[in-house]
Amino acid sequence: MSQDIQAVKIEIFDNIGRKVLQFMPDESIGYVIWRGDDDSGNRLPSGVYFLRFSSLTAIKTIPIVLLR
């Protein structure tokens, strides 16, 4: 079975829509680990965030909860 590999961008937004983090994962990894920090390395507070997966063919946004 052949699978098409696509570049994926993963972004995390806070509850007012500000982008707090962007991942451009290496396509050979297949997963990312978010430790609750923003792009500057600042620790983010507990709350609801939105995780957006984007590829050439699809965009999916899901809510996630960060608990400290």
Image: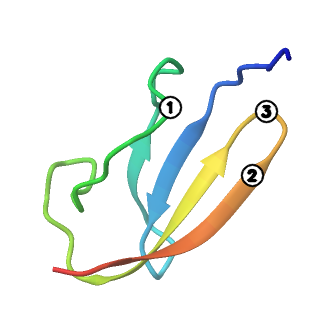
Is 68 on the left or on the right of 4, as rendered?
left
Which residue was labeled with disc 3?
Answer: 56
Is 59 on the left or on the right of 37, as rendered?
right
Q: Which mark is residue 10?
A: none
CA distance for labels 2 and 3: 8 Å
Label 2 sits on what residue type?
Ile
Label 1 sits on what residue type?
Gly
> Residue at position x 62%, y 50% from top?
53
Above-or-below relation of 10 to 20: above
Q: Which mark is residue 59?
A: 2
Label 3 sits on what residue type?
Leu
CA distance for labels 2 and 1: 17 Å
Which residue was labeled with disc 1?
Answer: 30
Name the outermost residue toward the front: 1
Q: Earlier in the sequence, mark 3 or mark 1?
A: 1
| Snapshot quadrant of residue 43 | bottom left
Classify mark 2: helix, strand or loop: strand
> Residue at position x 45%, y 30% from top?
25
Residue 26, image x, y percentages: 46, 21
Classify mark 3: helix, strand or loop: loop
- Which corner quadrant holds the C terminus? bottom left
- Judging depth in this view, the residue of 18 and 51 nearest the camera is 51
Residue 32, image x, y percentages: 39, 41
Q: Residues within 10 Å of mark 3 (few under 14, many from 20)?
A: few
Q: Earlier in the sequence, mark 2 or mark 1?
A: 1
Residue 38, image x, y percentages: 26, 56
Label 2 with label 3: CB-CB less than 8 Å:
no
